[in-house]
Amino acid sequence: MSARAAGTPARQAAEPQAELVTTDLAIGGMTCGACVARVEKKLARLEGVSAGVNLATGRARVVHPGSLDAAELVAAVEAAGYTAELPDDAEAGPALHEDLLPAWQLAVVAALAVPVIVLAMVPGLQFRGWQWVSVALAVPVVTWGSAEFHRRAWRGLRHATGTMDSLVSLGILASAGWSAYALLFGGAGELGMEMPFSLTAQAGEGAHVYLEAAVGVPLFVLCGRWLEGRVRDRTGSALRALAELGAKDVCVLDDGAERRIPIDRLLPGQLFVVRPGEKVATDGVVVEGGSALDLSLLTGESMPVEVGPGDRVTGATLNVGGRLLVRATEVGRDTQLARITALVVDAQTGKARSQRLADTVAGVFVPCALAIAVCVLGFWLGAGAEPAAAVTAAVAVLVVACPCALGLATPTALLAATGRGAELGVLVRGPEVLESLRRIDTVVLDKTGTLTNGRMELLEAVAAPGADLDAVFRRAGALEDHSEHPVGRAVTAAARRRCGDDLPAVHGFAAEPGTGVSGEVEGVTVRVVRPTAAGPLPGPLAAALVKAETDGRTAVVVELDGTAAALLVVGDSLRAGSYRTVHRLRGIGLTPVLATGDGPGAARAVAEHLGIAEVHSGASPERKAELVAELRAAGRSVAVVGDGVNDAVALAAADLGVALGSGTDAAIGAAGLTLVRGEIETVVDAVLLARRTLATVRANLGWAFGYNLVLIPLAAVGLLNPMLAGLAMSVSSVLVVGNSLRLRTWRPGPARSARPGAGG
């Protein structure tokens, strides 16, 4: 089980202050929020140490001085009465709950306990000597079946602390002890004795034993924990699935010979082969071959993506086409898959404010419950009630007060949400990000590379009267194929799409810096130049040029034998879904703001097309950060969405930074949320997921607090049988975890509308 540092297996990473490192520990033996508070308190007693413990994942994230050895952290946790281990590198995801009873042992406990409960609840089935048969069945349950409760309660007592197990153990021992007294000294052991069943603490007439509570409480608690373990384990399946995505071995190419090696022996710069049906072993660049890659397992992208020489590929994606030869660029912890896994680990190890509050409450709840139980016992005895009724009421308080649901209310919801977010291509850096998303009311959007594709494309072609546009494209594309200029590449790409790959030959190619290119194609002198270097333009071309300049686009003129034949308008096109994103942001009550370094014309054209009212053009990186500060000073909660180095300052300054997965490392590092697929529309899904998560947390906490507020008074006044108290406590925990698990099936709603042609 495990130590992770900064979300990476078995690693300790230095914090910015240099002397602090972060280590993750796997904690065993925790059952409630009181356990969490105990471990955190014990670790915090070490000099310079701060710790956050997550009950749902069984992980403790400890920030400590580098001079403090991990063994000292483990010793501190063990001194608190729990186990702590450093995890294996291969382990991923939340710790499994190995300390729970196996299913077969739970079945044995149920087989022994159910007959005892039935005999106590149905007086008509009580045969002569039934109570002694119940004793024979109950003893293994109270001892062997409940041994874990007693062991942990004793361990807590030795450390002068109380946990949920303390309450359960006391309840079991009190019920069994009173039953033994009644059987031996109270007349309940007489053959032929019949006992009425009561849902309350009142014993009614005649002798009464509480063996049904002594076996029912451990049965229901163990069932509840077993179900919790299975459900909580499912919430961590996304992280384990990420860990299992990577290839286990790789076929490398050395001196023309192929050989297969384990993936951990692959080095950066090595060539490896990816055949159809195989996973790409690691991040790299295609050297030879062409194929389509299925990215759905990693990013959720449903359509295969075509790749060829020079294209980057990501490890764990599936090759569904031809053979690829790839040069490895990143391996091990530097790959995108490893970074994604690390981000999810960070998110699932962190704690939200609501969780910290619940853990604090749970930490003081157990001592309070013990005090209430003692007061209830004293009150009923002092009021002249039968000792059996007084003991039963106190036991019911002990059992029903277990704060298990309170400790699980927040972490299970956050665990499920971060796992679901990873499946949807939304990587959350920590639980606090989900809380920030819930409060966001303004979204500042970068333009280039965020709302737009970030590369030059042909947006419009206007032919002069009488000109053949196909011929213009064929000749201009052939000429620009010899140019490395971004405008030239955009013209060539458009020509190939329109006329095919067989472009005519070019003779006498010449490039004029700052002007354009020229050459002879198919016996015609062709020039592709700036409008200022061209001759007079016909009316349609002149009008198109004015519009292009107004919109901040780049225009070039194609001349055939000295005559202007067409005007080609080149610019950065909108991403598919940009309009839907802005529309959906407004639909959920958020205000979009455009901030770009481009000029007013280009900024205004994009803003008008998308329907963004507030526009800030010509914004430097510093100006973007100032804009964020101004918006926050005006009382707005701001998220910034960007992809470039120039966005990093604003991303860090905002209440929440959102980076596109296709963006730069600087942007991703400054952001709290990363959209793996690079699709900006996913930010809307992230906001909706955060809102659903926080609603689930509130519902869980409401149930956990409400359950205790209602049932503890009922138990105290004698209106709740201990067996039913145990059932209610277990059902409460399972309901909280089950409610959180619903987030695993959450799906973002469909886009409300899409403007035709707005995808750009």
Image (cartoon, rainbow, N blue to C red):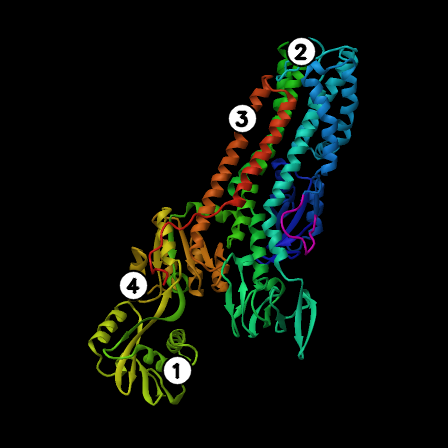
Residue marked by disc 4 = 605
Q: Nearer the viewer, residue 192 or 582?
A: 192
**Which of labels 1 and 3 is toward the front?**
1
Q: Percent from the top left, x then y, of residue 34?
A: 62, 35
Residues under numbered marks 2 and 4 in contact, where contact means CB atoms less than 8 Å apart: no
Locate residue 107: give its quadrant. Answer: top right
Secondary structure found at label 2: loop
- Whether residue 372 is situated above or below residue 668 in the rendered picture: above
Q: Is residue 524 visible?
A: yes
Q: Is residue 48 visible?
A: no
Residue marked by disc 1 = 478
- Disc nearer the start of the sequence (2/3): 2
Q: Percent from the top left, x then y, of residue 96?
A: 67, 45
Residues under numbered marks 2 and 3 in contact, where contact means CB atoms less than 8 Å apart: no
Q: How far apart in space, not on screen, are marks 2 and 3 (Cα)?
A: 26 Å
The numbered disc on residue 386 is: 2
Secondary structure found at label 3: helix
Query: What residue is shown at x 34% (from left), y 90% (from top)?
Result: 523
**Which of labels 2 and 4 is toward the front?**
4
